[in-house]
């Protein structure tokens, strides 16, 4: 039996899974800290993709270089969106906060999608660099450079986030706020400011993910919802509270999809994630790597 | 130091505090006793800025603080050890202590404060890298107090520090509180454990149904009929007579 296609599939699963993880980390951070499910996360990812596409298309900027522009730019977008929209729901009590933040998220998703439609049209875009399509071949299995680098960049971004959250005062303030915002405010932490920073970081992470998506996958105004759903599945798989957990769960989903393509055919790819989602919710509602809620 | 004037506090549509006035002078240990549900916790939360009062003034060293956010009140040196301790359970003992020293002023003194806290509670040095949620109840209370000390409080508010602890541990904790006070920190303590609290107190207030129902010095309160009947468990008239 020829094992090459199986392994090739698993390798692609690893690469796409890294992107799922990358897309989920920002959503998980925002959800964990603000207790707000930002359903426009996928649209923010799309924006990041268009930033790198535009930089490449108009100025020939290498997409890996444009991360250094897309991430700060999306950070600023995050500051603006929180200040203009999400800030207003943060003081509401739990139920009203969830409902209103979902409404804001869906509204924002529509606005961003239509904005992208006007600015970049409905055409599907992707970046094809001089080195796209090249790669190393090991034992008959291809490792494309762009996707390998994408995985490395995603892992580095997650690593940086981890160091920031565990080694700096601002990062510890974010973790404290996510555990117990009242106790955090009793430490002298300005909780409202922590929310802003966490939201902006989450948006910047979506921007990085978008840049990686624009490289080897496609960007279009309508991709937002699909990415939000992928990220949501990954967050539920991982559980809250673990950054690396979200990344690992992303790779798990990527591999599960890759395996299912080989076993059941490509048309069942989307089903696998949802089946995993339901199984985890039934058997381990705190997620694979999540803290059990006391 | 702290002056509370005609304060009223309500949650949604339920009012818990009705026109409370009290004072805490610098260097004092003031105790707030009262039954469960009397509003002790609510009053503490109002002072700390977690539950802004509906009406009335809370004045710290002449400046009103009743409309400040909780983090600004910490910066002014008023620090609450909340009911139930509210540690960051998933973080290590060390990280909890570091978070205590979050404000700019406290951060500058962090190393010194850490040494002092570990001197007062050596167990916290031993358990440095352990997750706070895995500590015993007494150790958790010590960490909660240690964390608050890291914020360099001038006025330390403690809400039920004896809750759920063994009597011997409570004794240790109260001894530490006495020592903290001798080091110059003013204490306001809400307690159901009235006897131990009143023995520690310079002055005390009784809070009943959201109102001040009595006040006096610690010894006065220990001798008061009302306090003895309602909070110290003396029931028979004969016993009361023989105590006098």
Image (cartoon, coloured by chain):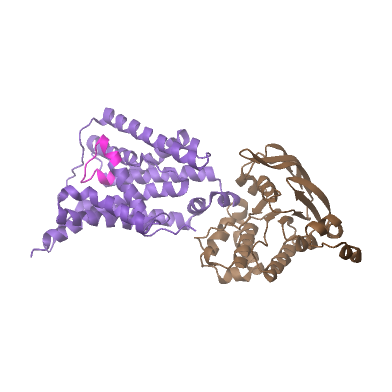
Judging depth in this view, the residue of A102 and B35 nearest the camera is B35
Q: Is residue A4 left or right of residue B55?
A: left
Answer whether residue A145 is magenta in the image.
no
Q: Position of residue A284 (x, y in %)?
A: 37, 59
Q: Is residue B41 above or below residue B236?
A: above
Q: Is residue A158 above or below residue A103?
A: below
* Picture residue at 86% right of the left edge, 60% below the top: B223
Answer whether residue A215 is magenta in the image.
yes
Q: Quadrant of residue B132?
A: bottom right
Q: Is residue B176 left or right of residue B71?
A: right
* Picture residue at 69% right of the left edge, 69% below the top: B167
The answer, for residue B189, to whether it is visible in the render is yes
Q: Which chain is purple?
A: A
Q: Position of residue A52 (x, y in %)?
A: 28, 40
Q: Quadrant of residue B68?
A: top right
Question: Magenta stretch?
Answer: A211-225
Judging depth in this view, the residue of A79 and A294 nearest the camera is A294
Q: Position of residue B173 (x, y in %)?
A: 69, 66
Q: Quadrant of residue B165?
A: bottom right
For this orientation, the residue located farthest to the top is A118
Q: Is residue A222 left or right of residue B159?
A: left
Instruction: Give the color of chain B as drawn.
Output: brown
The answer, for residue A132, to whether it is visible in the render is no
């Amino acid at each position: 039996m020829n094992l090459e296609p199986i392994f090739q599939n698993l390798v692609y699963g690893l690469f796409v899974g890294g992107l799922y993880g990358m897309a989920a980390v920002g959503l998980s951070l925002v959800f964990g800290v603000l207790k707000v499910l930002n359903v426009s996360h996928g649209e923010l990812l799309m924006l990041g993709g268009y930033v790198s596409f535009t930089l490449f298309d108009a100025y020939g900027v290498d997409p890996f270089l444009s991360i250094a522009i897309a991430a700060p730019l999306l950070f600023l977008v995050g500051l603006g969106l929180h200040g203009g929209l999400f800030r207003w729901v943060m003081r509401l009590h739990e139920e009203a906060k969830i409902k209103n933040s979902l409404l804001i998220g869906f509204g924002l998703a529509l606005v961003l999608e239509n904005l992208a439609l006007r600015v970049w049209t409905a055409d599907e875009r992707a970046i094809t660099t001089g080195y796209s399509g090249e790669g190393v071949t090991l034992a008959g299995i291809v490792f494309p450079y762009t996707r390998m680098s994408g995985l490395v960049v995603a892992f580095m971004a997650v690593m940086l986030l981890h160091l920031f959250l565990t080694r700096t005062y601002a990062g510890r303030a974010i973790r404290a706020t996510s555990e117990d915002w009242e106790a955090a405010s009793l430490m002298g932490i300005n909780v409202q400011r922590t929310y802003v920073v966490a939201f902006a970081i989450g948006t910047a992470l979506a921007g990085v993910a978008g840049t990686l998506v624009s490289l080897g996958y496609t960007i279009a105004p309508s991709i937002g919802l699909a990415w939000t759903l992928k990220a949501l599945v990954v967050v539920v798989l991982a559980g809250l509270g673990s950054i690396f957990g979200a990344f690992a769960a992303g790779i798990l989903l990527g591999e599960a999809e890759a395996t299912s393509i080989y076993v059941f055919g490509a048309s069942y790819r989307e089903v696998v994630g949802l089946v995993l989602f339901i199984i985890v919710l039934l058997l381990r509602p705190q997620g694979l790597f999540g803290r059990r809620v006391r | 130091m702290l002056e509370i004037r005609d304060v009223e506090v309500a949650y949604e549509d339920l009012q818990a505090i009705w026109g409370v006035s009290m004072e805490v002078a610098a260097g004092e240990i003031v105790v707030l006793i009262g039954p469960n549900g009397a509003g002790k916790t609510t009053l503490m939360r109002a002072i700390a800025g977690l539950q802004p009062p509906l009406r009335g003034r809370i004045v710290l060293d002449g400046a009103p603080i009743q409309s400040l956010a909780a983090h600004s009140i910490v910066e002014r040196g008023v620090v609450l050890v909340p009911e139930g301790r509210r540690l960051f359970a998933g973080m290590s003992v060390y990280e909890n202590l570091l978070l205590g020293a979050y404000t700019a002023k406290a951060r500058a003194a962090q190393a010194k404060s850490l040494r002092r806290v570990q001197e007062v509670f050596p167990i916290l040095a031993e358990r440095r890298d352990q997750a706070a949620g895995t500590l015993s109840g007494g150790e958790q209370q010590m960490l909660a107090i240690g964390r608050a000390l890291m914020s360099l409080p001038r006025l330390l508010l403690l809400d039920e520090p004896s809750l759920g602890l063994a009597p011997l541990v409570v004794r240790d904790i109260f001894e530490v509180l006495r020592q903290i006070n001798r080091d110059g920190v003013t204490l306001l303590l809400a307690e159901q454990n009235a006897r131990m609290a009143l023995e520690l107190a310079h002055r005390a207030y009784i809070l009943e149904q959201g109102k001040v129902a009595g006040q006096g010095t610690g010894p006065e309160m220990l001798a008061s009929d009302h306090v003895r009947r309602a909070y110290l468990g003396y029931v028979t008239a004969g016993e009361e007579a023989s105590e006098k």
